[in-house]
Amino acid sequence: MRRRTVALALALGLLACQSSHDTTSPSTQPSSSTQPSSSTVIPGSETAWAEDMAVFAAGIRRVHPNPFWRQSEAEFDESVAAAPARLAAMSGPDGAVEVMRLAAGIDGHTGLYPAEAGFHLVALHLYLFDDGVHVVNAPDESLVGARVTAIGATPIDAAIDRVRPYAAHDNDATTNVVVPMLLMTPEVLHATGIVDGPTPEYHVETVDGRALDVAPDVLDWPTFRSRYGGDPVGLPKRPAPPFLARRDEAFWWTALDDSAGGAALYLQYNRVVARSGGITLPMLVAELTAALDRGEADRLIIDLRHNPGGDNRTYPPLLRWLIADARINRPGGLFVLIGRQTFSAAMNFATEVDTGTAAVFVGEPTGGRPNLYGDVRPVYLPNSRITVRVSSRYWEFGGPDDTRPWIAPDVAVAITSADLLAGLDPVLDAAIHAPGP
């Protein structure tokens, strides 16, 4: 059986990260059978939106294996039936944002992907910590660490509440990684009434206590990615803490010396793919095995905190080794760092590690469920020309009785905004200093 899931595309569903085996791309053109059927339909009219909503509802039912696992069919039908009148009263991209909301309640992969929809981003990278929304990357380095207090006239807590229904999610952890990206998206801010104009203003309090009003540039997604080195999801690449410095590499490893807390191998596994640069996954396993043979370490730490997924057909060489090597698969021998961005194929991997090894999980709850929906397929709305990606497959890696919303950590640790500024990684530290069995 070919095992595959789409990478966190938002959302991790929303986030527009295409997996290597996804059969569609933002440039894919609809077939002639999905083009508008009548030249008399006025785009944006209630009639046009009613046609689109009929296609949307039929597509959800046709593609998704169980679209009403979370919301009832009656609730879904009621929302879709009421949508055309609301949509016809909207202008510009507000309608696309409303379609995003309609799809968001289905699962973490299903949704309207912002980059594909032509949405924009402000030149501030935001992250939701326990103590609020903070700037984690910006053109002005002095803004890094600043806490956002309001967007326009809307207090930040109210802004979070307004955008939350637009976040495609498997669980609350997925929502927490998607919400900051939505707060960076002018189209979403306008559609939710957080701001009136196209250029949002952010009110922030810097780490030295200054209150500033910031009107960042508005960028398209390719420009944001090139300027900031990646998608606006999770924590960005930064020199410190070290777990952020190489987050753009698919996987890499190092030995942690005694000064770091003990003899451990650290593997950062950021994308579920077959190779990272010139290193294949079997080559990686051979390197780790050789390091254990040389006595460089007596335990392994695998970091999945940045991993939104990929192709779950690629990880079996690593999984088989983790299960088979008694030096690793023992109490105190294997630690897995998890978080809100651990999703999709990375969630498949984490679930199989959970069920097949003695691993201790450290960090935050995962952004994906052990049993999840994935492998999106496009549903094209002919009049608005909006594409909604819909999950087409159910992955039951946790078994038929596993109803957990996430994998919860055995050792719960979260990085704070102060940790980020100080270059600290309390999650890794907790794994390094964990007591033996």
Image (cartoon, rainbow, N blue to C red):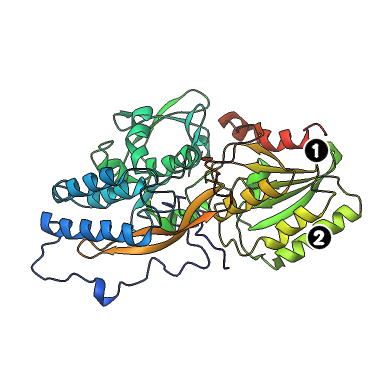
Residue nearest the observer in this picture, 4 or 291: 4
Direction left: furthest residue: 40
Residue nearest the observer in this picture, 155 or 170: 170
Q: Is residue 322 left or right of residue 12?
A: right
Q: What's the CA distance linking mark 2 and mark 1?
A: 21 Å
Instruction: Give residue 322's position: percent from left, percent from top.
Output: 76, 53
Q: Is residue 47 left or right of residue 159?
A: left
Q: Which mark is residue 287?
A: 2
Direction bottom: furthest residue: 32
Relative to 255, say whether 154 is above or below. above
Direction front: furthest residue: 401
Amino acid at circle 2: Glu
Reading the image, the residue beneath label 1 is: 260
| Element under disc 1 | helix
> Do we see residue 150 in this rendering?
yes
Q: Alpha-carbon neighbours of circle 1 within 10 Å: few (<14), some, or many (≥20)?
A: few
Amino acid at circle 1: Ala
Quarter of the image containing the N terminus?
bottom right
